[in-house]
Image: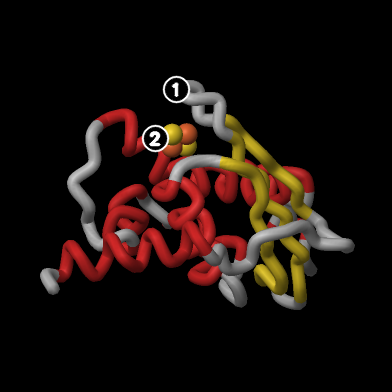
Amino acid sequence: MSSADIYRELILDYYRSPRNFGKLEKFDIDAHDTNPLCGDDIGMQIRVGVGRSIEEIKFSGKGCAISQASASMLTELAKGKPLEWVKQLSKEDIFKMLGDPDLGPSRVKCALLGMKVLKMGVYGYLGAHYEDPDDTP
Ligand code: FES
């Protein structure tokens, strides 16, 4: 089995049994967005913990195997990380996480939808809870 096959299997496995799929009862961040090319939609909810970390995270919605697997893997990667970590997350990180698959432009949008939602949610939260370092004694 080539490494491309292994990653393809992994993507299908996450699609069939998505980790962290569902909704949180208590959350601080709730964001969702749609892939304009197909209308598929992903939502993410996050509970913020001590030190502004991602204490709990779940995703929901519908979409193709790449979009669902990417969002699911991303929730696993993000869990326990500080919110600030999300800022430096890049599309290259997502492609690497998915095993650098050969994606056409429309599939790139599928792969990056989860990251877009995560960033929208976290940036919104950080903006609303901005702590000015000059304000701290
Ligand atoms: Fe809709 Fe991939 S085809 S997210």
Quadrant in the picture for the N terminus: bottom left
Q: Amino acid at mark 1?
A: Leu
Q: Secondary structure at mark 2?
A: helix
User: Where's residue 4, x and y in %?
Assistant: 17, 62
Circle 1 Cα neighbour tier, 10 Å, few/some/many (<14 / 14–19 / ≥20) = few
Task: Classify 10 Å Cα crowding around label 2: few (below 14), some (14-19), many (20 and above).
Answer: some
Query: Which residue is label 2 attached to?
Result: 109
Between the residue at mark 1 and the residue at mark 2, the CA separation in whole angstroms equals: 8 Å
How is the structure coloured here? secondary structure
Q: Is residue 14 above or below residue 71?
A: below
Q: Nearer the viewer, residue 112 or 2?
A: 2
Q: Position of residue 53 (x, y in %)?
A: 67, 71
Q: Amino acid at mark 2?
A: Lys
Residue drawn at point x = 76 percent, y = 52 percent: 29
Question: Quarter of the image holding residue 17?
Answer: bottom right
Q: Please identify the quadrant where the C terminus is shown.
A: bottom right
- Disc 2 under 8 Å from ligand 1? The reply is yes
Q: Which mark is residue 37?
A: 1
* Left or right of 57 in this view: 89: left
At horizontal 34% and vertical 48% (from top left) the residue drawn is 91
Dot 1 or dot 2: first in sequence order is: 1
Q: How far across and down, in percent of the image, does residue 41 sit?
A: 60, 36
Q: In the rendered image, which quarter is residue 24 located in?
A: bottom right
Residue at 44% x, 22% y: name it: 37
